[in-house]
Image (tube, coloured by chain):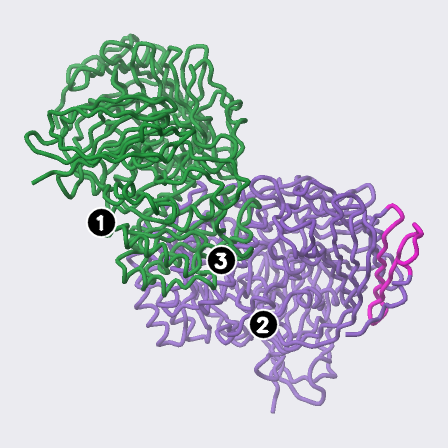
Chain colours: A green, B purple
Amino acid sequence: MTRFIAVVLALFASSTVLSQSLSVKSTDSRYLLKVEVTPAGILQYSLSFLGKQVVQPSALGFDLEKPKTKLNRFKLESVDSSYINQNWAPIWGEYATIKNEYKELVLHVKQTTNPAIQVAVRFRLFKDGLGFRYEFPSQTNLSHFVVKEENTQIVVGKNHTAFWIPGDYDTNEYLYNTTKLSEVHALAAAKKEKDIAVTSLVSDQTVQTPLLLKSADGLYISIHEAALRNYPAWLLNLNKANFSFESTLVPDAVGNKAYLQTPANTPWRTILVSNKATEILASTTILNLNEPTAFENTSFIKPQKFAGMWWEMHVGKANWPLAGGKHGANTENVKKYIDFAAAHKLDGVLVEGWNQGWEDWFGNWKENVFDFVSPYPDYDIQYLTKYAQSKGVRLIMHHETSGAVTNYERRMDTAYRFMNLNGINTVKTGYVGKIIPRGEHHDGQWMVNHYERVAAKAGTYGIMVDAHESVHPTGLHRTFPNWMANEAARGTEFNNAPTLGITPEHTTIIPFTRLMGGPMDFTPGMFHMKLNQFDPSRKTVIRTTLAKQLAFYITIYSPLQMVSDLPENYEGKMDAFQFIEDVPVDWADTKILAAEPGDYLAIARKDKKSEDWYLGAVTDENKRALALSLNFLSPGKKYEAIIYADADNADFEKNPEAYKISKQMVQSTDQLSFQLARSGGVAVRFRLMD
Amino acid sequence: MTRFIAVVLALFASSTVLSQSLSVKSTDSRYLLKVEVTPAGILQYSLSFLGKQVVQPSALGFDLEKPKTKLNRFKLESVDSSYINQNWAPIWGEYATIKNEYKELVLHVKQTTNPAIQVAVRFRLFKDGLGFRYEFPSQTNLSHFVVKEENTQIVVGKNHTAFWIPGDYDTNEYLYNTTKLSEVHALAAAKKEKDIAVTSLVSDQTVQTPLLLKSADGLYISIHEAALRNYPAWLLNLNKANFSFESTLVPDAVGNKAYLQTPANTPWRTILVSNKATEILASTTILNLNEPTAFENTSFIKPQKFAGMWWEMHVGKANWPLAGGKHGANTENVKKYIDFAAAHKLDGVLVEGWNQGWEDWFGNWKENVFDFVSPYPDYDIQYLTKYAQSKGVRLIMHHETSGAVTNYERRMDTAYRFMNLNGINTVKTGYVGKIIPRGEHHDGQWMVNHYERVAAKAGTYGIMVDAHESVHPTGLHRTFPNWMANEAARGTEFNNAPTLGITPEHTTIIPFTRLMGGPMDFTPGMFHMKLNQFDPSRKTVIRTTLAKQLAFYITIYSPLQMVSDLPENYEGKMDAFQFIEDVPVDWADTKILAAEPGDYLAIARKDKKSEDWYLGAVTDENKRALALSLNFLSPGKKYEAIIYADADNADFEKNPEAYKISKQMVQSTDQLSFQLARSGGVAVRFRLMD
C-alpha cells in the first residue's frame, strides 16, 4: 500500500470556502477522477476518460428516514489514499488469475447541519473502471438508521445511445431496448411485454443496471453496482433535461429503502469506460470490488454442464404437476436423462417438477406451496440417486419457492439436509411470483439478504446454487463461489413466449449488460428451433441458428452451463453436439476478440485443464463476416481448429438448423474468417497438437 | 346427532320474496336465535335471552378484494340442522370434563349477483353462548380469494356499559376502560398510555375483543371469537348512532385482510349472554368451538409453577444484557433460583437474558438480533441443566424475538433442538417490537399463523409454549394443549410502569375479558409492593394487598403459573408463601361463587390430584365483605380451611403486605365470611380431613 496523495491534505487546514478538490488518475492515466466539496458543501465527483468528460460533476448524498435528515451538505474532514496491486485466483471463472490494481481515495466528510453525521466515500480507480461507495462509520450520533433514498447522481450530460430495460422492483426479464436517452420510455417499453409473471414498474424514466451507454464519439460506458449486500438494488432515474441519472432504491413493504446499522456501507457504484467495446467485456472491476470468499472449504464447488427435465415442460411434451397425466419428472423419464448425461460426460441432471405442490403453485400469493422434501409418488428419488451415482452423474434439485420466501426460509435447513441425504449438491432456486413477505420485492433489501442467506447456508451444506428470478448479480460469486449462476435476465425459456420472445440481438447485448454482474444460466444448446414439436398450435420459434446456440457456450459465460434441448433433439446431430460435449465450463484465460453491443461479439477462452482454446462468435439479425486473428494461441504451437459454423444457406428464419463442421490446422499467426448467418454464430475448438 | 328442524325447509320451495326466517332455542330455552334472509337478500341474525333482545337484526357479509365483489345479497339455498351432546376431557384446565352440547343450524346461501359465490353460515347455540362462523365451500367460482373486510354486524342497540380496550393491530396490553358505549373514545384512552412498546391504533370508535357489555337491565354480554386460525384477529367498530358493532380485520403489509382458499372458514364469532356475571365466567362455549387436539402424544404436557430470573430485571436489581455489569442470568444467580424452586416444589425456573443479543435488541426494527442458541459466557447452560435435573427442577427457556419473526422462524428448528439437547421443555416466547416481516402486525393473519406454527412445531419437539405479546387467545389451547398460556394483556410487569400501571380494578375485569379466550401468564405472587427496593428513585408500587396476590392463583387461571417475586422477598413470609407452594395448577372442577366485573370475583376450584378445594376472591379499590356458601364441598365431609386473608389493617395504599392466616374446620353446609381490604383478596385451601 502506497500513499500517493499527501499534499492535498494541506488544503483542508485553510478556512477558506473555496472548493476543496482532489483528483486521481488511473495508473495508465486514461481515467481521471475529480472529487470536490463545493463552497456550498456539495460533495461531487466527475470522471474523464482519455481527456473526454464522461461524468460531469455529479452530487452524492442521502435522504434518511430515521433520523429524519438529508445528507447533502458536507465539510471535508480528511482524506486517505492508497495504491493496491495484487493478484488473486478465483475458484472458477473466466480467468485463472485476476489482477486487482487500483488507486483508492477516501473522503471523510461530515454533514454541516445537525445531526453532524459522518460519512466516508471510498473511490477505487482501476485501469478498467471506477467504483465508489458510501460508508457510515461507527459514531455517537448514528447507530441504527433507515434510508429513505440514496441520492447518487451520474450526469452523463449527452444524449447517448442506451441499452436499457425498464426499471422494475420485481423482474429483470425484459428484452433490452436500444434507444437514444431522449427516447427512453420505460413504461411504454414494458407495455409491450406480456409474458413476465410479476412486474412492478417504477416510472417512465427509470431504468435498471447494468446499463450500457455508447457516446457519439465512440465511448462505451457501463453503469452497475458491485457487492450488493444488505441493501436494496438500485435503479436509475433519468433526467432528460441534462441527461443525468439519479439513483433510486427498491423499497420495502412500508416504503423504506434500507435498514442499516453503523458501521455500514453501500454497494459499490461502478462506472466502466472505454473506447473499445471489448474492454468493457474484459473488465474485472466488479469482481475486484467484491470481498474474497470467507469459505474455508471450497472443494465441493465444481463447474458443471447439465441436462435437465425442463424444456420438455416448456414445449408441452410434459408438465410439472402430477395431475393432468403428463408428469415429466417420473422415474423412467429421468433415468433417460441420466443415461443421456452419462453418455455425453455431462455432470448433472436438473429435475423440475419432482416435488409435490405444482398443482396449485402460482398466481395466488399462496404461502405454503412446496415443502421441498416430498417427491411425487412416481419419482423414486432414492433409486435415481443411486442410479445416477452408478453412472457418474448427479441429480440437480429444483427448489421453486413461487415467491413464498418465508415458507422457503423456514424449510431451508430441512431441504438441504434432504439434499445431503440424497447426495445432491446443486440446487436451482426459483422465485416466480409475488414475494411473501407480502409487500417485499424481489430486488429489495430483505430479498437481497435472502439470496445471500441461501448462498451462505447452502455453502455450509456443501451445496452449489443457481438462482432464478433473483436480483441482478453484482460479482458476489467471488465472495460466495458456490452461488455460481443466476438467471436474472431473459433466458432461453422466453423463446417459448408468444409476444416478444428472444430477438436475435438480445444475446449480443446481454454480455454487455446483465453479464457484467456475473454468470448467467441462460440455458443454451437448442438444436430444434420450431416449438410446435408436441403442440402443433404453437407458432413460436427459436430465432437463432444452431451454430449460434453452440457459440453461446463461449459468449454467455456460466460455470453451470445447461445442455437444454431434449435428448432426442440432439439425435442425428451428434457431430455438432460434440462441441457441447467438449466445451469446458471453467477457464484459464479469456480474450475478447471483437465486440459491438447489439451487433456481434467474439470471445476466445482457454481451458483451465488443458492447453486447448475455444472460440465463440455470434451476430444479431444481420449476417456478418468476421476475420479474427488467432494471436491468443501459444506462439509456435500447432492446433487443430474444429469449426462449427453456419451452413452457407443457414438463416435464423429460413434454415436455422443448418450447420457445417470443418477442421483445419492453425497457429497463432493465422487469421480465421467466418461467415455468420443472420442471427448465426460460430464455435471453434482449438485442440493443441502435441 | 338429531335433526330438530325439518319443517323450515318447506319454506324455501316457495318462490315468494317474503323473508325466509328460522329460529332456534337453546336446550334450556333461555337463548333464542333468529336467522333470516330478507326480501332484499340481506342475511341477518338476532339473539334474545330470557325474552330480552340482546342482538337486534344484524347483517352478515363480506367484501372481497379478489375476486372484487361484495358478498351482501344472498338467496337461501338450503339449511342443515343438528343437535350434539357429548362430553370431553381436556388435557388440563379448569374442568376435568366439559359438556359440549349445542344445536346447530347451517344456512347455505348464494350471492345473488355475479359471481354467485356460495357461503355457509354455521350457528351453534349452546346453553352458555352462541357461536357462528362463515364457511366458503369448494366451488367452481371460488378457489383462492382475498378478503378486503368481513362485515359482521352486532347491533346491541342500547347504550350499555362496556369494559373495553382501544382497537389496536399490535397490542392488547391496555388498561381496561369502563364507560357507557356513548363514551367510548379509543384514541383518547390510548393517549393516556405511555408504557406500551408498539401501538397501531385504528380509530376512536374501534375496540378489541373479548369485550364485555352490561345492560341497564342486568344482562352481561361477552363478545369474542373462537378458534382464530389462518385469519386475522377481528376488531369491532362501534357505531354510536344505533349502538352497533361492525367487524374490522387486522390488515397485512399491503392492506389486505386474509388470503384464503376454499374450503375455508372464519373463526367463530361468539356472543355469550347471561343475567348472572358468574355464568359468563363459567362458559365453556369458546373452548367447545375449538377443535380437539390432533396431537398423538400429549404426555409431555404438564401444568407447572415456576420461579424466574425476571422480576430482578424489572426492578433494576439486574439486567438482561451482559454489558453494563448487572447481568442477571449468570450461573450463580440462576443456581439460587433452582435451589429456591426445589425447596418449594416449583417445577421450573424461567431464565431471561440468558442469550446473546440483549445489548441491542429493541426499537430499531432490527432483524438479526438473537440466534436462540448462544448463551452469554457467564451462563453455563449445561451445568445448570444438570444441576436443575439433580434437584428435580427444569429450566424454562426464553425466546424473545424482538418482533423479528422471520429471524425466529428460520431458527426455530435449531432452537428447539438446542432445547431438547439441554433437557428444556418449556419456552416463553416474546414479540416485543414492530414485526418483521415489516408491515405485518402482531394480530394479522401472518402472525396468527406464526403463533400456531410455533405451537405445532414446539409440539413435535415435546415443548410447551407460553407466548407473550401475542394475539388474543381464542381457546386454541384445546387444539394445541402445549400452547398453554399467553400474556396478551396487561400483566404484573406493568406494576413497574410509571404512567398508569395496574389499577386495583384491572384484575376484576380481565377474567371477564382477556381470560375468556384462555389462560393468562399474568405472573402473580408479588409479596413486596414498593418497587424502590433497588432503585430508590422509583415511585411505582404494586396496588394490591399480599392476600390478593395469593388469590390471583385462583382467579387468574393458568396452567403455567409464575411465582414471580424475588426469592428474598418471600423470606419472612413463608407462612403466606405456603399457599403458593400448595396451590395446584390443574383442576378437576371450578365454581364461580360470586362476580361482578370491575368490582370483585370469587372462585372455588377442586384439585385434580386430590379432594382438596381452593378458593380465591379479589376486590377492586373498595373494601368488601363477602359471605360465600361452601356448598361446593363434598357433602358430609370435613375440611380444614386454611385462610390467607388481608390483615384487619391491610390496605393496598397504606399497608399492602399485611396478612393474617387462620384455620378452621368447615363443611359444605357452612358459609364463610371474608373481609377484603381495599384492593385486597383472600385465598383458602380446603384440606379434606380423612
Query: In the rendering, which numbered label is found on residue A298?
Result: 1
Residue density around tag 1, few if under 14, some if 14–19, many if 20 or more, within 10 Å: some
Q: Position of residue B535 (x, y in %)?
A: 43, 50
User: Left or right: where does residue B677 sit relative to residue A184?
Assistant: right
* Vertical arrangement, residue A8 with respect to residue B437, above or below: above
Q: Which of labels 3 and 2 is toward the front?
A: 3
Task: Name which residue type carries label 1.
Answer: Thr
Task: Name which residue type carries label 3.
Answer: Gln
Tell me which residue sits at (69%, 62%) in the image: B623
Q: Which chain contains the residue that carries disc 2?
A: B
Q: Are marks 3 and 1 in contact (CB under 8 Å)?
A: no
Query: In the rendering, which numbered label is found on residue A356?
Result: 3
Magenta stretch bounds: B11-40
User: Left or right: where does residue A646 sit relative to residue B457?
Assistant: left
Furthest-bottom residue in this view: B690
Near-viewer residue (B19 or B211): B19
Q: Which of labels 3 and 1 is toward the front?
A: 3
Q: Which chain contains the residue that carries disc 1?
A: A
Q: Which residue is mark 2?
A: B660
Q: Which of labels 2 and 1 is toward the front?
A: 1
Task: Name which residue type carries label 2.
Answer: Lys
Tell me which residue sits at (30%, 16%) in the image: A45
Picture quadrant of residue B239:
top right
Decide which of tag 3 and tag 1 comes sooner along the chain: 1
